[in-house]
Image (cartoon, helix red, strand yellow):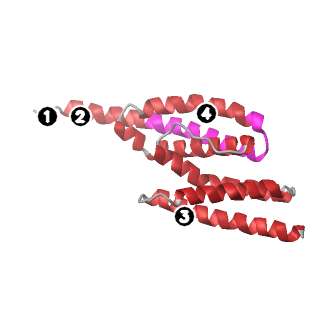
Amino acid sequence: MINFAKLRKDVQDYDSEREHLIKQSRDVLKLSKQIIYAVHRDELTEAAKLIKQIETEKKKLDAIAKHSRKMGSEGSYKVAIQEYAEALLYYHFVKDGKLVDLAIDTEHFILGLADLPGELVRKAVFLAGKGEVEKVIKIKDEVDTIYGELLKFDFRDNEVRRKFDSIKYDLRKLEDLVLDLKLKGR
């Protein structure tokens, strides 16, 4: 005989955990955006404090996601982790001048990495306004490297493909910015 009470409980338990996951994902997402905003304002000390907070919140999120294989595929979880990746990659690039590896799922890392050039374009425009041409060139070169390396992949997932395609346009913006700065410098 089918145990409908058990099936109903399983569905209710999953829904309850999913709601918990969504709430925790929002916390990680919010901190990611705060980190990026702090880095844009050159408040690296504040960003470092936020990174400590996000690491704690991400551990809680990961613990919830481990309750079920299906939970790790939830949209809110994926978005939170890719934003986490973008925020940490951006922080470390601005702070140390290099990209770092993160111990997260490859797909989430690539999605966060693919979003990074958008933030780097914003940073480059800010730096160009301050006349820091060499830093703008370094950003352009890094985005060029990201694009070149990701070209070697065979992306079949539409979300990854779309984000990858946007890197090409960010790179073009940076190339135009560098050219404009060089022409003005002559």
Is residue 49 part of the magenta span, yes or no? Answer: no
Instruction: Please provide percent x and percent y for residue 85.
Output: 58, 43
Marks 1 and 3, Cα distance to the nearest angstrom? Answer: 49 Å
Which residue in the structure is indicated by mark 1? 2
Q: Amino acid at mark 3?
A: Asp
Main SS, magenta residues: helix
Q: Amino acid at mark 1?
A: Ile
Label 2 secondary element: helix
Marks 1 and 2, Cα distance to the nearest angstrom? Answer: 9 Å
Marks 1 and 4, Cα distance to the nearest angstrom? Answer: 43 Å
Please identify the quarter of the rendering in which residue 171 is found.
bottom right
Which residue in the structure is indicated by mark 2? 7
Q: Nearer the viewer, mark 1 or mark 3?
A: 3
Marks 3 and 2, Cα distance to the nearest angstrom? Answer: 43 Å
Along the polypeptide, which appears first: circle 1 or circle 4?
1
Along the polypeptide, which appears first: circle 3 or circle 2?
2
Instruction: Please provide percent x and percent y for residue 8.
Output: 26, 34
Along the polypeptide, which appears first: circle 2 or circle 4?
2
Q: Nearer the viewer, mark 1 or mark 4?
A: 4
Instruction: Please provide percent x and percent y for residue 62.
Output: 47, 33
Q: Quadrant of the N terminus?
A: top left
Magenta region: 19-46
Which residue in the structure is indicated by mark 3? 165
In this rendering, the answer to whether 181 lies above or below 19 is below
